[in-house]
Image (cartoon, helix red, strand yellow):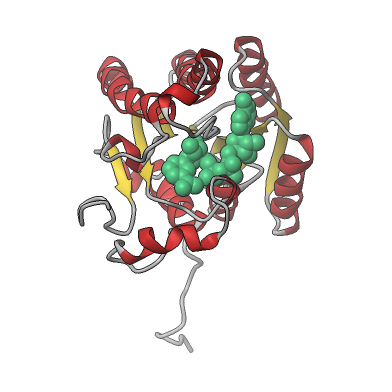
Amino acid sequence: MINATAPTHETPRRLAGKVVLVSGGGTGIGRAAALAYAREGANVALAGRRAAEIEATARDIALAGGDALPIVTDVSQEDDIRRLLAAVTAHYGRLDVAFNNAGIIGNFAPITEQSSEDFDRVIAINLRGVWLAMKYEIETFLAQRSGGVIINTSSWLTHGALAGSSSYSASKGALDAMIRAVALEYSGQGIRVNNINPGIIDTPMARGSVADSAAFAPFIAHTPAGRLGESEDIGDVALWLATDEARFITGQSLLVDGGYTIAGMR
Ligand SMILES: NC(=O)c1ccc[n+]([C@@H]2O[C@H](COP(=O)([O-])OP(=O)(O)OC[C@H]3O[C@@H](n4cnc5c(N)ncnc54)[C@H](O)[C@@H]3O)[C@@H](O)[C@H]2O)c1
């Protein structure tokens, strides 16, 4: 006898058989996204500067029954990016989705207290690194004749301001402008390019930028959601943007900030 209330099949996993590349996948937002991609059946390549961190994420994915490949990479180095894409396609045979998420906060200080080297370093990783990654990822998609999805991590700071953020904000604001052009260039080939603009998310980066957690109180007080973001809040959006459910979205920078920006930042 058939029990009509029992499910007759498992829900298909949303990224089954896909290959996803995550940069900065050893910590914070990148790690949460990598775990979400793997949960939905993707093979996950993890790029990051520190081997121990990306290896730990790879181990956790394997323990949960998934498949991950850690590849030590400095995203600001063109040779590293070339080698990264070559390693991913050699190992998994293809690339379907890239989450270009690695970034640094840099020297968060008033402009007169920053050096031009501070500025160059933030731009090299947060902006040039994403430009480089997109260039080689799109070349890979075109060579496969497959289409593909790119998601980059921008910031709520492209809509607001914090004293000390001039270099960081410049790097992220440029990402929002840049993807509109890239999305136009390749939408005809089935390639979607979007940014996620997180609010303040409780990650090693955010913790490292304040003396103690009391510094977050004013942000929480002015966030309609009533809390800081968690890495999973962003990882789950990075997952959704990678799926076919987001097939009609391209060239967009999506604020994921619990309403902080629309409520008027203080
Ligand atoms: N936490 C926040 O409040 C917040 C808000 C808005 C945007 N973001 C952005 O989110 C992204 C992820 O940051 P997070 O908050 O998870 O912090 P995080 O410091 O945990 O993650 C950043 C990751 O990038 C990696 N990385 C840094 N430079 C690299 C390089 N040159 N090559 C390869 N990997 C490198 C780090 O090793 C780290 O794993 C960053 O782009 C950050 O700017 C964070």
Q: Nearer the viewer, residue 107 or 122?
A: 107
Q: Residue furthest front?
A: 112
Please indicate, yes or no, whether residue 262 appears anywhere in the rendered image. yes
| Viewer-proximal residue among 263 and 7 | 263
Is 224 above or below relative to 105? below
Question: x%, y% of residue 200?
Answer: 42, 51
Residue 215 x/y as whole percent:
47, 57
Instruction: Say which residue appears at 53% left-offset and 61% top-offset.
Output: 213
Is 1 left or right of 47, judged from the image as shown? left
Figure quadrant of residue 183: top left
The residue furthest right is 52
Taking the image as shown, residue 79 lies to the left or right of residue 3, namely: right
Q: Position of residue 80 (x, y in %)?
A: 66, 16
Residue drawn at 48 percent across, 16 percent down = 128
- What percent of the width, then of the height, locates residue 18? 54, 39
Q: In the image, what residue occupies the spot 58% across and 26% down?
A: 94
Q: Residue at x 29, y 55 (%)?
A: 260
Q: Is residue 209 above or below residue 175?
A: below
Q: Is residue 164 above or below residue 115?
A: below
**Residue 95 appears in which quarter of the rendering?**
top right
